[in-house]
Image (cartoon, rainbow, N blue to C red):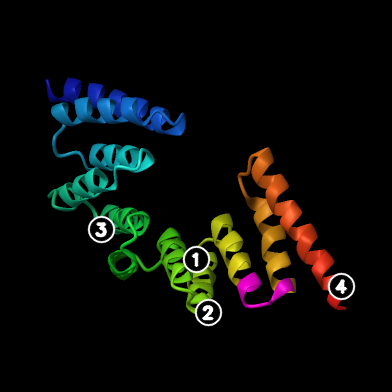
Amino acid sequence: MNWIKNYISRMYHNWSETYVQRGQADRAIDASTKALKLTPNSVTCYVDRGMAYMQKGAYTQAIQDFDYALKLPTITRQEKAELYARRGLAYLYMGDTSAAISDYNLAIFMVKSLSMAYVYRGIAEMSLDNHLAAITDFNQAIHYDGDNFIAYRRRGDCQVKLGNIRAAIKDYWRYVEIGTLNAKQRDEICSRINQLETQLCQTA
């Protein structure tokens, strides 16, 4: 009987992920809630629902789901680290930068190679205008995952703030080369690169 519940729960989990990808947060929440009724100790289902809550801006509910998942006996060290990083992002969106950085620190303490935790912490540092600290985090993110295109984009933003235009252009081009970008994102960053290259020519 349990295998049937697990099978149906996985189906709801798959639907929830699909709904999130489509931007249908309410349907994702409904699917995850149904999955949790079948498998109440599923870390994955709480993560799914928490991410759906984040998508619709319901950060308090997202944090509640992440908090509950962190207490589950089945959670692995990797899952716990990823959850701290996700919860930190929710705190950051709520404007609680201190709580966000604290969670990113916990995530990195648990799994030193968790690239996105460095990215999120770097973004938090950027919000405090700590651009050198942010660059250090983005460097670490790239060290552990050379294809982390978000780290290149954000490091480029920091380089612009610090006046390191050539370094920024290099990072932005790398972002274009390896990033999964839509046409609007590609046009936006290419326009940014052109502006910076023009700026370089004018100051040469």
In this view, the mark in front (3 or 2): 2
| CA gap, disc 1 and disc 4 | 33 Å
Which mark is nearer the camera, 1 or 4? 4
Q: What residue type is labelled 1?
A: Ala
- Residue annotated with mark 1: 141
For the residues labelled 3 and 4, the Cα–Cα distance comes to 52 Å
Q: Picture coordinates of residue 72 (x, y %)? A: 14, 48
Classify 104 as above or below 35: below
Q: Is residue 59 above or below residue 139?
A: above
Q: Nearer the viewer, mark 3 or mark 4?
A: 4
Tell me the quarter of the picture where residue 180 sits.
Answer: top right
Q: Which of marks 1 and 4 is nearer the N terminus?
A: 1
Q: Which label's residue is closer to the chain start, 1 or 3? A: 3
Of 62 and 173, the residue lying toward us: 62
Other residues around mark 1 within 10 Å, as few (<14) / some (14–19) / many (≥20): many
- Residue lying at 62% horizontally and 49% vertically, measured from the top left: 179
- Residue placed under numbered mark 2 in the picture: 132
- Specify the segment rendered in magenta: 159-165
Reply above or below: 18 against 167.
above
Residue 35: image location, x then y, percent: 22, 28
For label 4, the residue is 202
Residue 160: x and y, percent?
A: 65, 70
| Residue tagged 3 | 77
